[in-house]
Amino acid sequence: MSLALAATACGGGSSSGGGSNDSPKELTYWASNQGASVEVDKKVLQPELDKFEKETGIKVKLEVVPWSDLLNRILTATTSGQGPDVLNIGNTWSASLQATGALLPWDAKNFEMIGGKDRFVDSALGSTGVEGQDPAAVPLYSMAYALYYNKQMFADAGITKPPATWDELVATGQKISKDGKWGLGAEGSNLSNNIHQVFVLAKQHGADFFTADGKPDFTSDGAVAAVKQYVDLMAEDKVVAPGNAEYAQNQSLSDFAKGKTAMVLWQTASATFKTMGMKDDEWGVAPAPVPSGTPGAGQATNSMVAGINMAVFKNSDNLDGATQFVKFMTSDAEQKLLNKAYGSIPPVKAAQSDPAFNTQATAVLRETLATSAAALPQVPDESQFETAVGTAVKELFADAANGREVTTGSVKEKLAKAQQQMPNK
């Protein structure tokens, strides 16, 4: 579907619209691809949208947008003024999209309309925009990275427990990487995933990709070491298959579910495994590795604060309906239902009390979010950072896959080129 067709229900209405009796009884909603496929998401979401229509009389036109297209689609919509009424955004993009001025600010009055800001956990609110400004979005799903492993492949290799350090992960991966099987899955062409992995590794090396005043700092020793460590899992350690350099969203999960790879570092993957035919007792989950083996803050950070936020285009001609829809999707009942379906954690406090969020699949994620996850920098240039550095990592994976040497110098060169592409370089 073209952008123009997808946006017909929005039409760039007045930012002061809504509230009148002739408000349109229709909303357009761009949902992010959370499940194993776009079709899985439609099956999860459509019954809930039908429920909302029955309750309010407002029909929601759903489009599930793949991650590879989502950011560009949103950025196009912010500049053209032709977008959906309501949309999902990766929480790391909140500050960048906030800077466009296209999204409805969630001030105290707007938060009150959906039950109040204090319903949401602090870690999720920390990734909704620039600190000190009204949030640009509302938390919808909370996620964290963890290490998932195939129990049978571990047993076959004589491995009795999941690795807690990177040295242990490499040693474990090398034991398994033979006879067509591989130790670890990666997605070299998935720019967002590349960023998430190297951001965490940079934290472990005592570095960040931005200075305290928000300027890009891609070529520090720690940032270079982080990117090299990640790419070296393929280039030097040989625990990632060269073909993974071309993998995009969910391809590493598919290999894991089929028993081709023994481990994968992923955010909230349990529901996807189930959709791919993997039984819950076939996999285990542990905290992602840290150098010391004990996750925590600072250099023991082992995940970014992952998640999905819900935003409203402020030029929607149905702001009242859009707000009602956000209230519905962040209600306690819907939070329990949707986060169970996706294996994520509700950012709404009351919904977390459900026992479903203290299972094998979710307990590690909750603990990680509470103790050892860090938010990506909430700076206006964050989305450009994801594209520029994510692409640099993709190119380095391509070098590794094609037998070209990946050195500290070549990594630094790619990151310097990425920094040159930044507006605030």
Image (tube, rainbow, N blue to C red):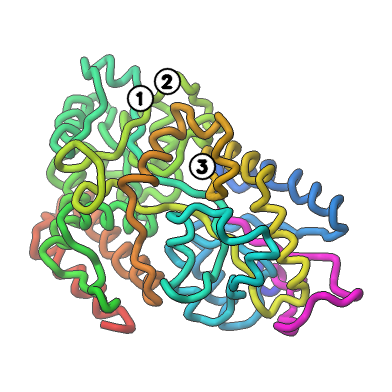
Q: Secondary structure at mark 2?
A: helix
Distance in Å between CA atoms under marks 1 and 3: 20 Å
**Which mark lies nearer to you, 1 or 3?**
3
Residue placed at 43% from the left, 73% from the top?
A: 130
Q: Which residues are magenta?
A: 5-33
Graded by Cα atoms within 10 Å as few (under 14), some (14 to 19) or many (20 or more), the crowding at tag 1 reads many
Graded by Cα atoms within 10 Å as few (under 14), some (14 to 19) or many (20 or more), the crowding at tag 3 reads many
Residue 224 left/right relative to 244: left
What amino acid is found at the position of numbered circle 2 in the picture?
Answer: Glu
The relative height of residue 255 versus residue 226 in the rendered view (above or below) is above
Report if the CB atoms under discs 3 and 2 are less than 8 Å apart: no
Report the predominant secondary structure element of the magenta stretch.
loop
Nearest to N terminus: mark 1 or mark 3:
1
Report if the CB atoms under discs 1 and 3 are less than 8 Å apart: no
What amino acid is found at the position of numbered circle 1 in the picture?
Answer: Asn
Q: Nearer the viewer, residue 26 or 416?
A: 26
Graded by Cα atoms within 10 Å as few (under 14), some (14 to 19) or many (20 or more), the crowding at tag 2 reads some
The relative height of residue 76 versus residue 165 in the rendered view (above or below) is below
Residue named by callout 1? 150
Q: Secondary structure at mark 1?
A: strand
Residue named by callout 2? 282
Q: Nearer the viewer, residue 241 or 118?
A: 118
Report if the CB atoms under discs 2 and 1 are less than 8 Å apart: yes
What amino acid is found at the position of numbered circle 3 in the picture?
Answer: Ser
Asked whether residue 40 is in view, the answer is no
Residue 232 left/right relative to 47: left
Residue named by callout 3? 344
Q: Quick check: is 15 in the magenta stretch? A: yes
Q: Residue 119 location in percent, x, y? A: 58, 53
Q: Residue furthest right?
A: 21
